[in-house]
Image (spheres, rainbow, N blue to C red):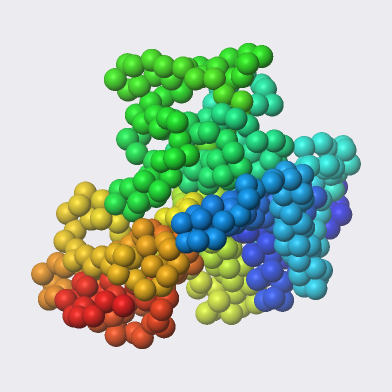
Amino acid sequence: GPADVECDVLVLGAGPGGYSAAFRAADLGLKVVIVERYATLGGVCLNVGCIPSKALLHVAAVMDEVSHLGDLGVSFGAPQVDIDKLRGHKEKVIGKLTGGLAAMAKMRKVTTVRGYGAFLDPYHVQVEETTGTGQDKTGTTKVVKFRNAIIAAGSQAVRLPFFPDDERIVESTGALALKSVPKKMLIVGGGIIGLEMGTVYSTLGARLDVVEMLDGLMQGADRDLVKVWQKMNAHRFDNILLKTKTVGAEATPDGIKVQFEGLDGTKSEGVYDLVLQAVGRTPNGKKIAADKAGVAVTDRGFIPVDVQMRTNVPNIFAIGDLVGQPMLAHKAVHEAHVAAEVIAGEIKGDAALAKAQFDARVIPSVAYTDPEVAWVGLTEDQAKAQGIKVKKGLFPWTASGRAIANGRDEGFTKLLFDDSPEAHGHGRILGGGIVGTHAGDMIGEIALAIEMGADAVDIGKTIHPHPTLGESIGMAAEVAHGSCTDLP
Ligand code: FAD
């Protein structure tokens, strides 16, 4: 039948990918419709991901910092936690941001259609209206006709099949709901999301166990960075089970009984008040009837795209978590801008815009733990594995005036430069890592240096303000080119 709504660009999903694509396309003069099943814009990141987790981590970090002040001569009483009020604070943070997005959508005349979208063909999506948290469908449908579509339907947490249905077993969304603080908590999966949530719950009073199949926590980061975090956080954990699989679980009145099996065959068991499954996320590519539009989806649910974010169907693009790793908000946003620009360029005959491509050299990663762990580009482990010769500049924060003044000098800043014979001793920066407070806020400078092709002299001769933690990046570069004479 005829379409209820028509547009130049339909954006399926309103996460960081979806809203960024919609806003850029609208700013470039296109008529845009966003289809979103949740009541608010912002997707996983704003509603149940990046933002609520950081709201809680901020509070945890302040609590931990305050507890350290005793050593510096200032003591407070034991913290009194009002969990309802804390949850309320987190909700307010989300509300401010999602409300801001709604206002920006309105200002740009972007239409939002609330509901669950599924393709009918390469030019139509059917939207079934949803209510509440987005799980309930009312049966009312609308058809949106589009010239181009951008699929930004994101991802969801992987659930282990042998876990029983029990409210004491949650994934990140359930953990962020922060209903109560358990005495004993198990984190299944030692990645960033699990360790961030563990930090929050442990500061609020929970004892932690973590189980990880691989041989170390926070995979992807160099072990020297992780070691600093692990030493500072050892007090939170009763058990860190590495090279261990979770193989079974049962709900009992005393708690969730979980069975483990080491890769060496060792069997063990634990009983927990709360179990957080944080074993990764799976793309939503198979849930949108992509086949009806002819869009190819891999077995795992990813949608393959080219450097312009175009799928195998020329008028349909895809971005964000469902096109591949790393599943990070800042990657989704940049891919979104490319897709919107290519579409606007093609519709308006603007050849320059139509040539937009995703060509980032590097995408930074940050664990917002305490201390933070951040890294970008080539890691030392990768350099070793790939036989790439690098020159390392490492600046320990025990030599940073600011870190010492902060009472937090456990961190360090590390830069890696190309040391291949072709670089003739003036190699460009290839990667870097920082562990320490505010590491995440500083890693962007290293990403910029990599994008600009800076060498150690460029970075070392850039005047950084003193005394700051960011100065450690300049100092690490000076260490690498051997001109580090005076430490602050
Ligand atoms: P999503 O944010 O997943 O949005 C997809 C949207 O599409 C959702 O709103 C969904 O409701 C909607 N949707 C899906 N299917 C349909 C459909 N058929 N019809 C209508 N609507 C649909 N990343 C970072 O960079 N930094 C962090 O600190 C960080 N912290 C995180 C913490 C947690 C606990 C979690 C879970 C994730 C975190 N991430 C973080 C990852 C980040 O949230 C994702 O990378 C990001 O949200 C991906 O954006 P997206 O636009 O691809 O999809």
Residue 413 screen position, x and y as percent? 33, 65
Task: Return the residue found at the far front.
Answer: 73
Q: 301 or 162, which lies in front?
A: 162
Q: 145 or 455, which lies in front?
A: 455
Q: Is residue 400 depicted above or below 459 in this figure?
A: above
Q: Residue at x 50, y 61 (%)?
A: 73
User: Is residue 13 at all visible to an observer of this figure?
Assistant: no
Q: Residue at x 72, y 49 (%)?
A: 86
Write down the quadrant of residue 148 in the picture.
bottom right
Residue 107 screen position, x and y as percent? 80, 73
Side of 79 relative to 277 (left or right):
right
Q: Check the picture and name the quadrant holding the C terminus.
A: bottom left
Residue 273 screen position, x and y as percent? 61, 25
Q: 150 or 62, which lies in front?
A: 62
Q: Residue at x 80, y 68 (%)?
A: 103
Write down the quadrant of residue 351 in the picture.
bottom right
Residue 469 screen position, x and y as percent? 41, 71
Side of 429 relative to 91 (left or right):
left
Q: Residue at x 77, y 49 (%)?
A: 85
